[in-house]
Image (cartoon, rainbow, N blue to C red):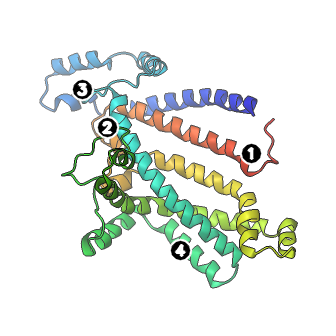
Amino acid sequence: MVKYVARRIFQLIPVLIGVSIIVFAIIHFIPGDPAQVILGEQASAEAIAQLRHQLGLDLPLYQQYFQFVWQLLKGDLGTSLLTQKPIIEEIVPHLAATAELTLFAMIFAVVIGVNAGIVSAWKRNTWLDYMPMIIALVGVSMPIFWLGLLEQWLFGIKLQWLPVLGRMDGRVQVETITNFYLIDTLLKGNITQFWESIKHLILPAVALGTIPMAYIARMTRSSMLEILKHDYVRTARAKGLHEFFVVYKHALKNSFSPVMTVIGLEVGRLLGGAVLTETIFGWPGVGQYIYNAIGYRDYAVIQSGILVLAVIFIVVNLIVDLLYTYLDPRIQYK
């Protein structure tokens, strides 16, 4: 196992180098001059040239790339061209916001999706099979922006049950410790703000988790149908074991490897920033942070932000690979 983990980590190096090269190249093909955007349309040519020199934008591309990589190796994500603040200080609160939203979205997706898939396979060719799969099909087909707006209209405007924008009421100031509002409000013992944070999470989490929920439900059903045909399942039933324990104790664990793959991919994708969801609900996540940086041609933020997301995605998939040995001990890493 140790050798396998070391080999996998070593394999990440060329992947990250390739990602950095691709990101750096694509970013510099974006039309527009960052210095022009920062100084405005009325800036003189001399002022633009001076700012380009200060930012290193007048250097050859290969020199800019090597400077970028050298900063990363030192643990420095660089400085925002627009705000002149360290990117690592700016991006951490946005990453925390996206991670908090992703966690709630995946809890919703996994709990609903796995159980819907199990029931669908368990009660195959009955209405308990057809109904969850119809809902899963609708969930995959439904555009997130439409679902988000529908949620806002129904639960926020008509029923006025839940807030529709932001992580917290704009009139409330949360004392941040970890930048995770749920944790920070609990650490401060402020139950009112904690409950308010949960209410702000519900609508965007449901909208964001709908598509992963549908994928998980369909994969769980497919995997369970295959496992339920095996001899050990029939043996468990023949021994008189209750059907609930046959399905949830014996069949589920052995069918969960492909489901875990889907969950890992979806976690990595959602951590990459759900720009549509964050935009609709005014959620200050990392996707929104990078999207705004694109509008200002803030190369440093875009490059560093995408690389951070790439590292997170790769690490999540590595963790999923390692979990396979727990779910299925027959897997041997050699």
Q: Residue at x 30, y 58 (%)?
A: 196
Q: Earlier in the sequence, mark 2 or mark 1?
A: 2
Q: Residue at x 50, y 68 (%)?
A: 139
**Secondary element at tag 2:** helix
Q: Position of residue 42 (x, y in %)?
A: 12, 30
> Which residue is disc 1 drawn over?
325
**Secondary element at tag 4:** helix
In this rendering, the label closer to the viewer, 1 or 3: 1
- Callout 3: few (<14), some (14-19), or many (20+) C-alpha neighbours within 10 Å? many
In this rendering, the label closer to the viewer, 2 or 1: 1
Q: Is residue 29 visible?
A: no
Q: Quadrant of residue 117?
A: bottom right
> Which residue is disc 3 drawn over?
35
Amino acid type at mark 1: Thr
Residue 135 numbered tag:
4
Give the Cα distance between marks 2 and 3: 13 Å
> Which residue is disc 2 drawn over?
293
In this rendering, the label closer to the viewer, 4 or 1: 1
Question: Is residue 326 shown left or right of residue 176?
Answer: right
Q: Position of residue 191 (x, y in %)?
A: 32, 55
